[in-house]
Image (cartoon, coloured by chain):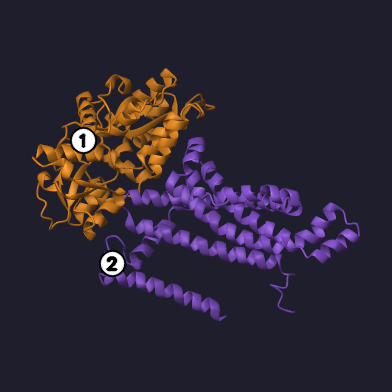
Amino acid sequence: MIRRLVLAVAVMLTAAACGSGPSVTEDGLTKITVGVIPIVDVAPVYLGVQKGFFAEQRLELELQTAQGGAAIVPGVVSGQFQFGFSNTTSLLLASAQGLPVKAVASGVASTGEPGKDFGAVVVAADSPIKTARDLAGKKVAVNTLRNINTTTVGNVVAADGGDPSAITYVELPFPDIAPAIARGDVDAGQLVEPFLTIATGQGDRQVVSNYAGTAPGLTVGLYFTGSQQDQAVVRAFTTAITRSMEYASAHPDEARAALSTYTKIDPAVQAALVLPKWPSTVDRASVQRLADLAQKDGLLPRAPDLNVLLP
Amino acid sequence: MRRPLLGAAGLLVVMALLEALPRAGLVDGRFLPPFGTTARALGAQLATGGFWTVLGQTARGWALGLALAMVAGVVAGMVIGSVPVLRAATASTIEFLRPIPSVALIPLVVLVYGSRPESALVLVVYAAFWQVLIQVLYGAADVDPVVRDTARSYRFSRWGTLRTVVWPTVLPYAATGFRLAAAVALILEITAELVIGVPGLGHAIGVAQSSGAVAETYALVIVVGLIGVVVNLSARAVERRVLRWHTSVRRDL
């Protein structure tokens, strides 16, 4: 609720909002603030800072964690953050509302392996739901209504021959979804890591990988900026974050270890969870796919021009 | 002597229940671990430097916000309360602003300050200020008319009246306001950290929660509860010290 309120107020106040721009530190580094969510997806940023990839580009990062991705968009638009991380559908929606958001780099992508992705729909072990089709007519928990998780779950259900319009979605924070399934409040829930590994470790069963099932290399999240950015800073950030993601992809153990610097994930879970893909380029076709799904579900009034959002 | 003992007994019962309920399967141990597990997680937390850093951040935000609210509330309350015209002119405005829950200002402070400590400070000061102001206003209205008239008969200056007549009457009210504000300030500090992501204990709870670390989450919640107890006990101690001359505290009457 609060996230939506924040977004609504941001839309109204965009013109009035004033923020502090990047400043230069004593040793000549440009100081920028990046809004992130303390989840697995952003491990490359933390790793990149450790490895000095941002300092190489004369950038000093201040990472500010927000509880929800939707709070980051207003932060970037108002100039609080110079860059932010958000899921692709949220950015498509923000862009369609006329907010000046511009993707600067790929953020996180599906592994493309059904059953071995970082996001999936899970049910209780003894649930009669066996395949995606069975989710039709059931209650499914998602962390945000009318966003990437409802469109992709609907898509994989439709692909399996079910009727996505018969699904009742319930909005719950990720930590509350497995308890709701256990109590029987919902029949299924869409989870991402580390909750996916925790839930399956406690006996829940994966039904379908909604990201991998939508597009093999689905671009789930993106790094983005607002409109009035210094282009040299944007280029430097893009270079550094791309380098960080390449490094994280090549050194998954270091990416895994970086998790303990900004999360409290249990060491056993940290070792077992499925890392997402951190590709260096945006999979444009998959963003188009998400836009089509958002339009089909009525989240977007018309087909968006991807050139406005994507680099 | 019996009251602290009873208090400790109450705590022990709660701990025993928290241990027994998950073990007996009455609640799901995955989502509410037995007290022993939580206590171990708490012990592990206490051993990390990060824990003390966030505890310090929370304490600093709370103390600063409370201090600002106290000063602003007492000054505004004394001034408004001693000038009947001001009091009449501000009454409806105060009654309009006071019920606005501080948390309703979250979208606003997020836009202006993002997840910096200033966000929490605004919420804490806003919430705590009204607690103090209202008490001080009541206190200023409670001045004994005979004493006030006596001061006037002796031609006390305005400052002299404030210091020797109004202030001693206001002080017990201000002390109550302080105790209420101390608790409210803590609630808002933690809320701001949890919801907005301002650095501090609340943020650590949020991170533990979004990491699926159930025991750590409860451990930090217990810490917040303990801080609440400490805050309340200290506020009462301050109250007794400041009002040691007052009939409500003096035992020798």
* Quadrant containing the N terminus of chain A in the rendered view: top left
Give B156 or A205, whichever is nearer the viewer.
B156
The amino acid type, in three-letter code, at marker 1 is Ser
Q: Is residue B67 visible?
A: yes
Residue B113, position as x, y percentages in the image: 51, 37
Please state if B3 lies on the left or on the right of B32 as rendered: right
Mark 1 — on which chain does it sit?
A
Q: Residue at x 48, y 75 (%)?
A: B8
Give A128 or B44, whichever is nearer the viewer.
A128
- Residue identified by numbered label 2: B27
Q: Give the image quarter of residue B232.
A: bottom right
Q: Residue at x 27, y 39 (%)?
A: A146
Please state if A254 lies on the left or on the right of B139 as rendered: left
Q: Residue at x 30, y 41 (%)?
A: A40
Q: Chain in purple?
A: B
Is residue A309 placed above or below A294 in the rendered structure? above
The amino acid type, in three-letter code, at marker 2 is Val
- Residue identified by numbered label 1: A110
Chain A display color: orange
Q: Secondary structure at mark 1?
A: loop
Q: Residue at x 50, y 39 (%)?
A: B108
Q: Is residue A61 visible?
A: no
Residue B116, position as x, y percentages in the image: 50, 40
Is residue B35 placed above or below B71 in the rendered structure? below
Q: Secondary structure at mark 2?
A: loop
